[in-house]
Image (cartoon, grey):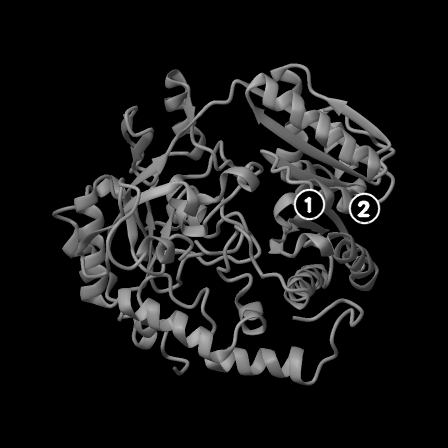
Amino acid sequence: MNDSTIGLAQASAPDFAGFLARLKPVIPAHCILSKVEDTRPYECDGLSLYRSLPPVVVLPETEEQVIAVLLACKAFNIPIVARGAGTGLSGGATPHAQGILLGLAKLNRIKKIDLESATATVEPGVRNLAISEAADAYGLYYAPDPSSQIACSIGGNIAENSGGVHCLKYGLTIHNVLRVRVITIDGEVIELGSEAPDSPGLDLLAAFIGSEGMLGIVTEVTVRLIPKPVCVQVIMASFASVEAASMAVTNIIAGGIIPAGLEMMDKRAVHMVEPFVKAGYDLDAEAILLCESDGTLEEVADEIARMEEVFRQAGATRLQVSHSEAERLLFWAGRKNAFPAAGRISPDYYCMDGTIPRRHLGRVLSAIEQMEDEYGLRCANVFHAGDGNLHPLIMFDSNQPNEVERAEKFGAAILELCVQVGGTVTGEHGVGIEKINQMCIQFTREELDFFEAVKRGFDPYGLLNPEKVIPTLARCAEYGKMHVHNGEIRFPDLPRF
């Protein structure tokens, strides 16, 4: 593979006039945006560090229009970046400077709630939470619940393989999507997966989920719905140290308990969100855990008692159990509103996403604390403790000299530490632009070439979301030279895998 493998469309200036002329008979004029004031809102996703103004934004209203856009892009050799609600945090929906931005927000119909199979069939622009709202009348809901679920779309969830606070027990998007209908760059309609328990052939659905718009465009999704539990309660446990809280997480799982959710916030995060949400968090704690149990009344009572015992043995300084649905939601409100709370105390923040083995939680968080001194920036930690999926929030001020650069270096150091201890550079936010350098650290050249081969199988022209996710040979050579071959191993006391 060479540097021209991805992004082949940049060899010459795109013929946007011809492209738009071809679309005019099939795409309504109000669905095509080309004025700067109209395209400006699409210049970045939730990761605003990376911006690129799209020359054209197309907002199709039907699957037939999506097909027309893809065929036009292929005919004029124009790159295409798909976008859902724009809540992504890795720059995956950052527009291509010489391509079009395909917004799928208008494909927002819930087509069917099937009670017999406990499934919902929806279009990609449907909000995550809207699925559960539609299924609520039938006593069902959709389990994956990212913090942005009130706004994020199911198509975007598929692109990033999103999780949420309940993914420990109920799984990520990949575990809850049964079937997707996809349009390829050739305009072909294919279906991956099945509403049946299994589907014939290779498991291409698993390859597609998390592919960040590089393989095709989703136009329809069938998701699994599950019954709403009879009873749900949350324990809020306080600890005098991050290490003690981390050990409690390990002991919960080792004790054979699989909570519906198991989240951690360190002291800085607690002090950040409590004035915003007023959830009653313990401001004296160095870390708090939120541990949820759901099921029948008897199951929850038994599990809550077992959880309390584990926390006491781990040294919990305070335990509080929710006794109403309103109180349970209030406990979770702080965790789910951590990002907006950060915006109240810092001009800018940078949310990272790496995953580590649970046993290294305490040591890695201590290492992040050391990095705060090294980079001169504050960091609050809120994360899916049960999965070892970290979400450090690096706070900075883009108006101050070098703070953006220091924030990026701080984030890169955290991701590379995750790899060093046997983890990964992303758990649910995707690679996008943000983590493309760390892909060079995580994977060998042979593995990256294999990823590229999969992309070529779906998109031989390199037009779908180019120059993201899979680094080129030159990028890896340069990044490896700077950060691996001539550099020192960070935190050598931590195990290497």
Q: Residue at x 59, y 17 (%)?
A: 297
Q: CA distance from mark 2 to mark 1?
A: 18 Å
Q: Is residue 109 left or right of residue 314?
A: left
Q: Residue at x 82, y 29 (%)?
A: 282
Residue 198 seen by the camera: yes
Q: Name the secondary structure under disc 2.
A: helix
- On the image, the x and y values in percent for residue 31 come to 26, 42
239, 201: nearer the viewer: 201
Q: Name the secondary structure under disc 1.
A: helix
Q: Residue at x 53, y 40 (%)?
A: 167
Q: Which mark is residue 262?
A: none
Looking at the picture, which amino acid does disc 2 mark? Val
Residue 459 seen by the camera: no
Circle 2 sits on which residue? 242
- On the image, the x and y values in percent for residue 277 come to 69, 26
In front: mark 2 or mark 1?
A: 1
Whichever of callouts 2 and 1 sits on the residue coming sooner in the sequence is 2
Look at the image and tell me in which quarter the N terminus lies: bottom left
Q: Is residue 55 left or right of residue 188?
A: right
Q: Is residue 73 left or right of residue 314?
A: left
Circle 1 sits on which residue? 254
Q: Is residue 444 left or right of residue 261?
A: left
Looking at the picture, which amino acid does disc 1 mark? Ala
Q: Residue at x 53, y 47 (%)?
A: 46
105, 136: nearer the viewer: 136
